[in-house]
Image (cartoon, rainbow, N blue to C red):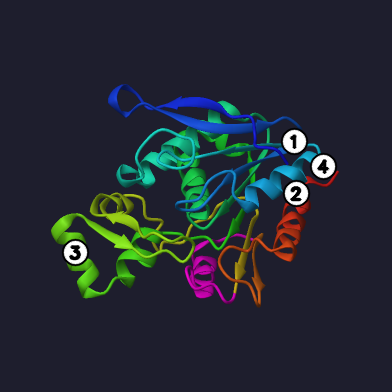
Amino acid sequence: MNEPELQFLQVGHGSAARNIAYAKQLGREPGIVWLQGFKSEMTSVKPTALAEWTAEQNLAFTRFDYSGHGRSDGCFEVGNLSAWLEEAVAVFRELTSGNQIVVGSSMGGNLALLLLRHLTKHDAAAADRVKALILIAPAWDMTEELIWRRLDIVAKSSLLKTGVWMRPSRYGDDPYPITGQLIEDGRRNLLGRTPWQPKRPVRILHGREDPDVPFNHSEQLMDILKGPDIELYEVPDGEHRLSRPEDLHRLFGLISEFTSD
């Protein structure tokens, strides 16, 4: 598939205003809204494959780059969950209509949960349009559970003293910055351990061999989410990205449960 035709949505006001790059395919409902992971872009493997599949199925599909990512405005180092959630809320409200399935990968899974919680509290009509969540290795409460608590004393000391720690990446040549403000902002956006009823179907796909978001992180999420239609699917040999053809086939199958005529 060719590069998507990009458009831009302004989010925020005054000095916080930024242009968010997005791509939108028209199609039938329920549409799909894609939320990617930390440091990922809407042109990476999974959203590109999902764009092709949704086009074949004549499904609406909306994806975007968070600020500081891809083609959107902003500096990655000043980004945080509050800003990225604000962008996800704006994209959902302003760029989609009708019923939607929110599909989130890694940090995007965290944001999918935060998006639903925000809409449930502040915009019931928009929340009602979320018909299901599909979460791929969801990194819920990632800044606290998966970053801060994993740091050794040297890394924590560096972060506290300088405000930044350069985290080695498994997926690129260069480390990337984890900032103190990212951690602090994350503490204002925790799902926590309090039981919560999403009140719609939730499907979780997670690789048993995931080194970044351990499989038991999703098992713990299953203890938090309450309701009759929440399921966790294990990929025994799967790692974090779950972007192999067989992984994508599993993902499409989960989505098809809610899009089949």
Of residue 170 and residue 14, the one placed in the foreground of this image is 170
Q: Amino acid at mark 3?
A: Ser
Residue found farthest to the left: 161
Q: Earlier in the sequence, mark 1 or mark 3?
A: 1
Q: Which residue is mark 4?
A: 56
Look at 65% across and 37% down and name the residue there. Answer: 3
14 w.r.t. 71: above or below: above
- Which quarter of the figure is the C terminus placed in? top right
Does the CB distance between marks 2 and 1 fall below 8 Å? no
Does the CB distance between marks 4 and 2 fall below 8 Å? no
The local crowd at label 3, few if under 14, some if 14 to 19, many if 20 or more residues have their Cα within 10 Å, is some
Q: Which residue is mark 3?
A: 158
Q: Is residue 1 visible?
A: yes
Q: Earlier in the sequence, mark 4 or mark 1?
A: 1
Rendering coords of residue 162 (x, y %):
16, 56
- Label 1: which secondary element: strand
The residue range painted magenta reads 208-228
Q: Identify the mark at residue 258; answer none if there is no mark.
A: 2
The local crowd at label 4, few if under 14, some if 14 to 19, many if 20 or more residues have their Cα within 10 Å, is few
Q: CA distance from mark 4 to mark 1?
A: 14 Å
Q: Earlier in the sequence, mark 3 or mark 2?
A: 3
Look at 55% across and 63% down and name the residue there. Answer: 137
